[in-house]
Amino acid sequence: MQRLESMKEFEDRMRVWGAGILRRCFCRAVVNGGSPGPGFGIHSLSDMFQRLEDTFQFCAQCRVLPDQLSDSKILRRCKRCRNVYYCSRECQRADWSVHKKVCWELRLVAIDRLLEWLVVTGDFSLTSGPWPWPPGAVRDWDTWFSMWGAQLDTILESVLGSHTMSTLWDSVGRPRPDPDSLRGSLRRLLTDALSQPLTVGLGLRTLVENTGKLGGITVHVVGASHIETFLASHGAYEELKHMFPESGGLHVVMVGVDLAVESVPQFTSVLPTTPATIQLSSYRGLYHDFWEEQIETGQAVWPDLVAGFHPGFHSSQDLMAGWLPTLLLLRDYEIPTIFTVYSQQELTASLQILMELETQIIAYGDNPFASLKPEQAYTNPNKQPVYCSAYYIMFRGTSHQPDGEEAGGKMDNRI
Ligand SMILES: [Zn+2]
Ligand SMILES: [Zn+2]
């Protein structure tokens, strides 16, 4: 708490970080069959971590909640992962055949969600710095970590030795994990934060021919939410600048209905770009409205690339209805686009939709810059954890032959 000057600042930071906690509170309420409770009124660090932990407290086997137990009973945590709870030995034994498949990964999840606090306090910075290697040599996380080598080790050691790190483990009600586990977690948090900018970079490398063009590069991040703006305001997108040191400047516009516009400057119109810099702005609204209002009126330039993280249009009719105008617009204006999804199943479903829409798929597959931080399904902890942006899809324009060519062909036949 050393660096947090006031309760106000504490609350501000909680609001950003707390979005995740709120979601979990909500999930828990759903498990409970009730509605989410009133605001969380947190007063200390231990209180906050306790509230966070409370959201995980239900028996993973029979779903009983702490207040539904008889007086003599309490929920006990799995000793291996310290992530799931059981009301009795019987429940734990009955659940083991399922839980054992994810126990190891859930152990990592439980550490990661606590260390995320160091990102919020600023004790663990997400920015790296100018790349010491030629950007082309950095193809995936292995090469990215090799590039930073000893320099990164020094940073991790200083975080491990920081006052906030000690305060954190004094406040959480569980023993401090060994240094290797903590280092591993910090590395995963880095991949989680830098996954988005580096995935945008992957899209630019693959789909945009001249990234060094005069006037700079414009990227639109569509369907952006508080996650994108959180990352942007914490400097994660600076990494993109280091990936394209030759660029005439990068302009990234976050467009989405639920983004937190207060953390990223609002989109005004075309801003002049300066070589080797990145400018971020945000627009709250739907992408096709943004397009109509800003691009069609000539106030903003066309994007060189559009990126979307987990758009989710495959998951429901409602989401698909919301995305359809944007998908058609991207297709018809032949905008190079990269989308990411969580799983193989989502990849297949999304590809199918894009093919039905006759978009021209350029590439898809394992994302070399996927987040390596496992994400737990809160209402169903034994579900296999997923990884953000695990797979990508790139498309551009239409797979359909233009009408003119078809007509021309027919004419030729006639002649
Ligand atoms: Zn139980
Ligand atoms: Zn376990």
Image (cartoon, helix red, strand yellow):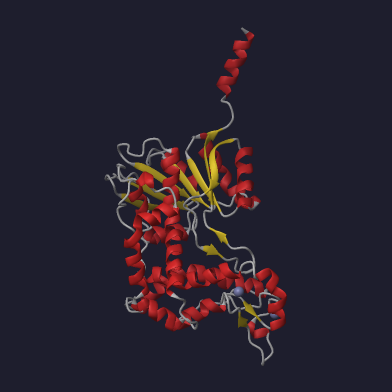
Q: Residue furthest bottom?
A: 72
In the rendered image, the vertical position of residue 248 relative to residue 309, given as above or below? above
Q: Horizontal and vertical percent for residue 244? A: 34, 45
Q: Horizontal and vertical percent for residue 276? A: 28, 47
Residue 391 in view: yes
| Residue 129 vs residue 361, the one in the foreground | 129
In the rendered image, the vertical position of residue 393 relative to residue 164, given as above or below? above
Q: Could you tell me which residue is drawn at 32 percent across and 76 percent down?
A: 3
Q: Horizontal and vertical percent for residue 220? A: 43, 46
Q: Residue furthest top?
A: 415
Q: Is residue 323 left or right of residue 273?
A: right
Q: Could you tell me which residue is drawn at 47 percent across and 79 percent down?
A: 48
The tally of labels here is: 0
Check the picture and name the quadrant holding the C terminus.
top right
Check the picture and name the quadrant holding the N terminus.
bottom left
Residue 44 in view: no
Q: Horizontal and vertical percent for residue 50? A: 51, 81
Q: Is residue 22 left or right of residue 93?
A: left
In the rendered image, the vertical position of residue 33 relative to residue 347, given as above or below? below
Q: Determine the image quadrant of residue 378.
A: bottom right
| Ligand 2 found in image quarter | bottom right
In the rendered image, the vertical position of residue 95 relative to residue 326, given as above or below? below
| Residue 44 vs residue 294, the one in the foreground | 44
| Residue 129 vs residue 148, the one in the foreground | 148
Q: Could you tell me which residue is drawn at 60 percent across and 41 percent down?
A: 354
